[in-house]
Image: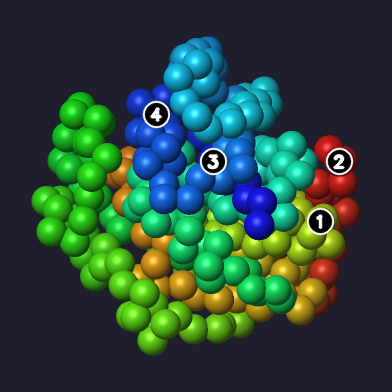
């Protein structure tokens, strides 16, 4: 199965480099890596350009002008660059376990999208990782919160992975789905601007379209670098869009990925 790994980023080149290096260490490499860049300055562009010279990965840089937080539009543009069968979405501050891509692939199933979990690193552990360019984390590592999420076990994954229909814990920092399922609901809604809810609203339309949620545990592990929280100033207006999709049983958004295909 051909897989694209899509990374959202904004002006965090050092963190992005760690993420890219963790992708190089994957036991199963994706067909390509598409950086969904929400308007970063030239430092990110130069980092990607230099990384492309030495890596075996196919890196595509999808960039849009900086007009505030527009992750939905940035993801749509990146997805439009892919011709893979399956898409894995992560954020540019997620260091990946070596089996991350393989875990998403082996758990993929027609009629489902996957929601994974993450391991949170403390501020001190993150600063050390960025300073030392440390890629190696495990259950025993210093500076880890929710430590049980760092356990990689196929047996435990089979026991605790569940199919769900609710929106609790929906996050596109660790999500995967078949590209055709994304196209069938017109991707993410470009009307979302500012942090929050574009991922939940996307999941609402997948669920309404008969694509169910698989909550993956103890597989597809990622280690989340600490950062200051984004402003929640746009949550009220974004909640209006989300609640409209829930109340109207929406399966499609009018302002979506079809603008870029």
Circles 4 and 2: CB atoms closer than 8 Å:
no
Which disc, if any, is residue 261?
2
Circles 1 and 2: CB atoms closer than 8 Å:
yes
Q: Is residue 89 visible?
A: yes
Measured as percent of width and height from the top left, residue 43 is found at 47, 15
Q: Quadrant of the N terminus?
A: bottom right
Provide the residue designation for mark 1: 183
Q: Earlier in the sequence, mark 3 or mark 4?
A: 3
Provide the residue designation for mark 4: 17
Kindly identify the residue that appears in the image at 45 percent across and 19 percent down: 54
Kindly identify the residue that appears in the image at 11 percent across and 51 percent down: 142
Q: Earlier in the sequence, mark 1 or mark 2?
A: 1
Left or right of 140 in this view: 159 = right
Kindly identify the residue that appears in the image at 29 percent across and 55 percent down: 120
- Helix, strand or loop at label 2? It is loop
In the image, residue 154 above or below residue 127: below
Q: Is residue 239 visible?
A: no
Q: Quadrant of the C terminus?
A: top right
* Mark 4 → mark 2, Cα distance in angstroms: 29 Å
Left or right of 175 in this view: 141 = left
- Helix, strand or loop at label 4? It is helix
Which disc, if any, is residue 7?
3
- Helix, strand or loop at label 1? It is helix
């Amino acid at each position: 199965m051909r897989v694209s790994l899509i990374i959202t980023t904004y002006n965090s080149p050092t963190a992005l480099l760690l993420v890219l290096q963790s992708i190089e260490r994957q036991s199963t490499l994706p067909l390509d890596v598409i950086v969904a860049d929400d308007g970063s300055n030239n430092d990110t562009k130069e980092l990607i350009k230099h990384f492309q010279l030495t890596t075996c990965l196919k890196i595509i840089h999808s960039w849009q002008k900086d007009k505030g937080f527009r992750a939905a539009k940035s993801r749509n543009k990146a997805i439009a660059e892919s011709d893979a069968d399956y898409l894995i979405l992560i954020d540019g501050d997620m260091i990946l376990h070596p089996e991350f891509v393989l875990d998403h692939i082996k758990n993929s199933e027609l009629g489902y999208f996957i929601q994974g979990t993450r391991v949170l690193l403390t501020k001190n552990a993150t600063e050390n990782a960025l300073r030392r360019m440390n890629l190696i984390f495990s259950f025993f590592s210093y500076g880890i919160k929710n430590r049980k999420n760092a356990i990689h076990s196929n047996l435990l994954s089979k026991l605790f992975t569940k199919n769900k229909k609710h929106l609790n814990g929906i996050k596109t920092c660790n999500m995967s789905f078949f590209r055709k399922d994304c196209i069938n609901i017109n991707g993410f809604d470009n009307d979302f601007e500012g942090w929050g809810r574009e991922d939940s609203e996307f999941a609402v339309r997948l669920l309404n379209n008969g694509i169910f949620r698989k909550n993956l545990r103890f597989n597809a592990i990622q280690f989340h670098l600490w950062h200051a929280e984004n402003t929640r100033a746009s949550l009220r207006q974004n909640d209006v869009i989300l609640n409209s999709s829930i109340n109207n049983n929406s399966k499609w958004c009018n302002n979506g990925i079809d603008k870029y295909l």
